[in-house]
Image (spheres, helix red, strand yellow):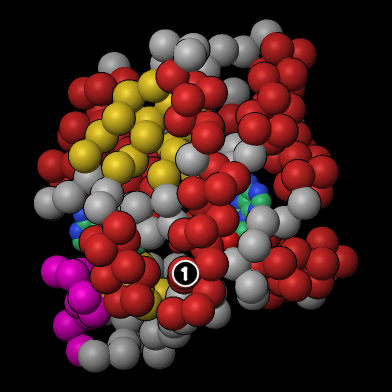
Amino acid sequence: MRLIFLGAPGAGKGTYAAQLCQQMGIPTISTGDILRANVKQGTALGQEAKTYMDKGGLVPDELVTRMLADRLSAEDVKPGFILDGFPRTIAQAQSLDVLLKEKGLNLTAVVNIDVPREVIIRRLSGRRMCPGCGANYNVNTNLKPKQAGVCDKCGAALITRSDDNEATIMNRLQVYEQQTAPLIAYYQKTGLMKTIQAEGEIADIVARIRAAVS
Ligand code: AP5
Ligand code: MG
C-alpha cells in the first residue's frame, strides 16, 4: 500500500497516518517530522529549513525532494508507506512521479483530507506536543491531556509547536491554498484521489480512510 495524504495544515494528516500505519504495518514518512528532527539536531539542512518553517513558508523543493528520495531508499518502505506532507507543490509531485517510476512503483491512492477552515484553526491553535515521546494532544478537542500541560504517557511538560502561533498558522494556510491545493486537480486526473470528510471521532475517520483505499 503506497498512499499520499494531502490536506491543509491541521487537517489531521499526522494523526490519521499514525493510526493507519500501525494497523497496516507500514511506515509514515512525514517530511515535516524529518525537517523538525533536523532542526532539533542542528544539522545544516535543519538550519536552512528553520528559516522557512518559522515563517510558515515551504522549504525549497530541491532540498525536500532530495531528503525524500533518501528516505524512500530505506529498507522499511519496501512493504509500502504513507507520505504525510509530501508532495506540497506541483514540482514535488512531478519529482515523485519520476522517483516512483525509476523504482517501478505505483501509488495505491491519494487521500485528500478535507476539513472546514474553522475546524483547522481550532485544531492548530489547540495542538500540544510531547517533546519526550512525541505524543500529540489538543486542548481544543477531546484529546486533552489528563493533567493540563503534562504528557499522559511519559510525564514530560507539553510544548506548542513553534509554527502553531496565529500569524504563522495564517501564513501556512495561505501557502497551502496557493501552492498545495493545486495538487488536488493534479491527482484527480490520475483517478487515484479519494476525498475524506475528516470531522468527528478519529477512529471513525481512520476507518473511513481505510475503507476508501482498500
Ligand atoms: P508539517 O509538519 O507537514 O505541517 P503541516 O502540513 O502544517 O501540517 P500539520 O502537521 O500542522 O497538521 P496535520 O495535518 O498533520 O494535523 P495533525 O494530525 O497534527 O510541515 C511543517 C513545515 O515543514 C511546513 O510549514 C514547511 O515549512 C515544512 N515542510 C514540510 N513538508 C514540506 C514539503 N514537502 N515541502 C516544503 N516544505 C515542507 O492534527 C492537528 C491537531 O488536531 C492535533 O492536535 C490532532 O490531535 C487534532 N485532531 C486531528 N483530528 C482530530 C479529530 N478528528 N478530533 C479531535 N482532534 C483532532
Ligand atoms: Mg503533521
In the rendered view, would you say 211 is above or below 132?
above
The residue at the far right in this view is 44
Q: Residue at 69% across / 35% down in the picture?
A: 92
The amino acid pointed to by label 1 is Met
The relative height of residue 212 versus residue 147 in the rendered view (above or below) is above
Residue wearing tag 1: 170
Res 134 → quadrant: bottom left
Q: In the image, which residues are magenta?
A: 139-147
Main secondary-structure element of the magenta-colored stretch? loop
Say whether residue 143 is magenta. Answer: yes
**Residue at (53, 32) in percent of width and height:** 183
Assess whether residue 95 is covered by the magenta stretch: no
| Front in this rendered view, residue 62 or 3 | 62
Residue 9 lies in quadrant: bottom left
Q: Position of residue 176 (x, y in %)?
A: 51, 51
- Which x, y percent locates residue 175? 56, 56
Q: Is residue 16 left or right of residue 31?
A: left
Residue 7: x and y in percent read 41, 44
Helix, strand or loop at label 1? It is: helix
Residue 193 placement (x, y as % from top left): 39, 21
Task: Please determine whether, in this image, residue 197 is positioned above or below residue 160.
Answer: above
Q: In which quadrant of the rendered image does the N terminus lie?
A: top left
